[in-house]
Image (tube, rainbow, N blue to C red):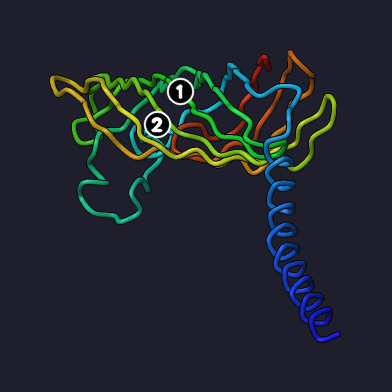
Amino acid sequence: MFMNTFAFSRFRIRLVLALGILLPGSGFLAAQTRFGAELPFRQEISFGVGTLPFVSSFGEFPLLDNQNVGGMGDLYDVYRTRYTDVSFLPVLSLNYRYALAERISIGVNLSATRAWGKGYNVVSGTDAAKKEITAFYLMPQFRYDYLVSRNWHLFGHVDLGAGYWTGQEDAEKISKVLFAGELVPIGATFGRRFFGGAELVVGTVTYGFRGSIGYRF
C-alpha cells in the first residue's frame, strides 16, 4: 500500500512537471506560429510623391515678406538674405517593406527632392545670389497596421535616419549631413497585389500629404 501511494505521488510530481514544461512551451510555439504565420504577401515596394519638402519652407529659404524668421529678432535674422520665387520639386520616395507579422513590418525609405530660390538683399535693396539645395534621405522604417482586410490597409509608421544636402549659395558650397525623420499617424492603401495609397506626413523630409502606388509579392 505504501509503495503504491509513493509511486502515485511520484507520478503526480512528474505529471505536474511535464505540464509545467509543455503548457508554456506550447503557448510559446503557438505564439511563434501566429507571429510567423504564412501571409499572402510578405514584401512590398512602392513609389511615392510628397506635396511639400521640408527643406523649402523651414528656414532655408526665408521669404521676403516674412520678417520673423528665427523669431529672435537679432541682426542675423533681420539682415539675412530673403528669397523670392521659391520653387521646389515634390519629394520623390522609394519604399521597401517586409512583413514580420500580419500587422507589424519593417522597411527602408529612400527620398530625394530639390529646392531653389532667387535671393534678395534687404540691406541694399538689390538682387542676391540664387540658392539651390538638392536633398537625399535614407530612413529605416517601422510600421504598424491598425486594420488589415483583403483590400484595405489602415496604418501608421515612423521613419528615422539621415539626410544629405548638397548645393550652392553664391560662391559658397552647401554640403551637410543631418537628422531625418518622418511620422505618419494615419495612412491607407487600397488594393490586394497592386495598390494605391495616401498618407498624412509630418517630418523633416516631407510635410503634408504623400500619394503612392505599389506592388506586393
- Residue 120 in picture, x, y percent from top left: 28, 27
Upstream in the sequence, badge 1 or badge 2?
2
Under tag 2, what secondary structure? Answer: helix
Give the amino acid type for the residue marked by disc 1 in the picture: Leu
Quadrant (top left, top right, bottom left, bottom right) of the N terminus: bottom right
Where on the picture, by quarter, is residue 84? top left
| Circle on res. 110 | 1
Q: Label 1's element? A: strand
Q: For residue 209, which quarter of the picture?
A: top right
Q: Nearer the viewer, residue 84 or 18?
A: 18
Q: Looking at the image, which residue is at 58% across and 36% down?
A: 201
Amino acid type of the residue tagged 2 in the rendering: Val
Q: Of 72 and 12, which appears nearest the observer?
A: 12
For the point 47% across and 17% down, the residue is: 89
Where is residue 61 drawn, in percent x and y? 35, 31
What is the x, y in percent for residue 157? 60, 40
Disc 2: which residue: 55
Looking at the picture, does residue 86 appear above or below residue 208?
above
- Nearest to the eye among marks 1 and 2: give it: 1
Residue 204 falls left or right of residue 28:
left
Q: Nearer the viewer, residue 167 or 157?
A: 157
